[in-house]
Image (spheres, helix red, strand yellow):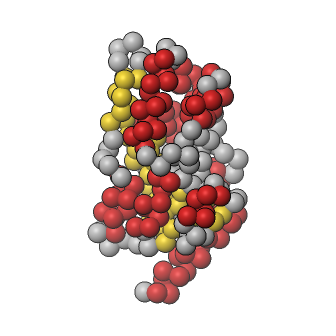
Amino acid sequence: MLACIDLEGVLLPEIWIKFAEKVGIEELKLTTRDIPNYDSLMRGRINILKQHNLKLQDIEAVIETLSPLEGAQDFLEWLKSEFQVIILSDTFYEFAGPLMKKLNYPALLCHSLIVENNGEVSGYKLRQQDQKTKAVKALQGLNLQVISAGDSYNDTGMLQQADAGILFCPPKKLTNEFPQFPVATDYIQFKNLFLKARERLIKDN
């Protein structure tokens, strides 16, 4: 049995929000919790970076100051002791890479940025469209049962595909739209929901 979990908002703070707070650009605070269409979200972000002459190194300087959410490291270590774990994220290796050491280097699948020689972020390269859902489906094809967890619109596909899905501290509108998923608002509840999901899946089989 495998746990597939999101990264930002679940284990790490939202990198774009922290960067937006640093540079004082309100529009950069928008995330997949606000805008379901990932391409529209990213194109908007890249345009804002260009308008304000902000480079990858400016974002990296903020990333260096970040730490996992309080309790996230202990939760992840517990999760790895109970399940095989893969982090499925729509962030980028250029962002998440420096923070993986602080999480003891979990398995991470995400995307890549296109960066020019001068540090300008000119685009991005998806691992594949809807990679989270497709990854869960592929793992199920290996006869693995998957429990997925996330906090945003871009997680709902993998939650629906998984054998069990959990929302962690999601916005209210998301819980209203997807009432079938149990909600955890702290890591203790999160652990309990994983254990309940596993118990149910074992019983069903």
Measured as percent of width and height from the top left, residue 111 is found at 38, 40
Task: Answer above or below: position of 89 versus 27.
Answer: below
Q: Is residue 152 left or right of residue 92?
A: right
Please state which of residues 164 and 175 is positioned toward the viewer in this rendering: 175
**Residue 182: x percent and y percent?**
60, 70
Between 115 and 29, the one nearer to me in the picture = 29
Above or below, comparing residue 82 to residue 70 in the picture: below
Q: Position of residue 171 (x, y in %)?
A: 63, 54
The quarter of the image holding the N terminus is: bottom left
Number of marks present in the image shown: 0
Residue depicted at 39% across the width and 55% down the height: 132
Above/below status of 23 relative to 154: above
At 35% from the left and 58% from the top, the residue drawn is 135
Q: Can residue 201 be seen by looking at this rendering?
A: yes
In which quadrant of the rendered image does the C terminus lie? bottom left
Q: State the residue at coordinates (57%, 22%).
A: 61
The answer to whether residue 103 is seen in the rendering is no
Using the image as rendered, state which of residue 172 and residue 8 is in the foreground.
172
* Residue at horizontal 36 percent and vertical 28 percent from the top: 123
Q: Position of residue 146 (x, y in %)?
A: 43, 68
In the image: residue 202, left or right of residue 173: left
Among the 4 quarters of the image, the one containing residue 167: bottom right
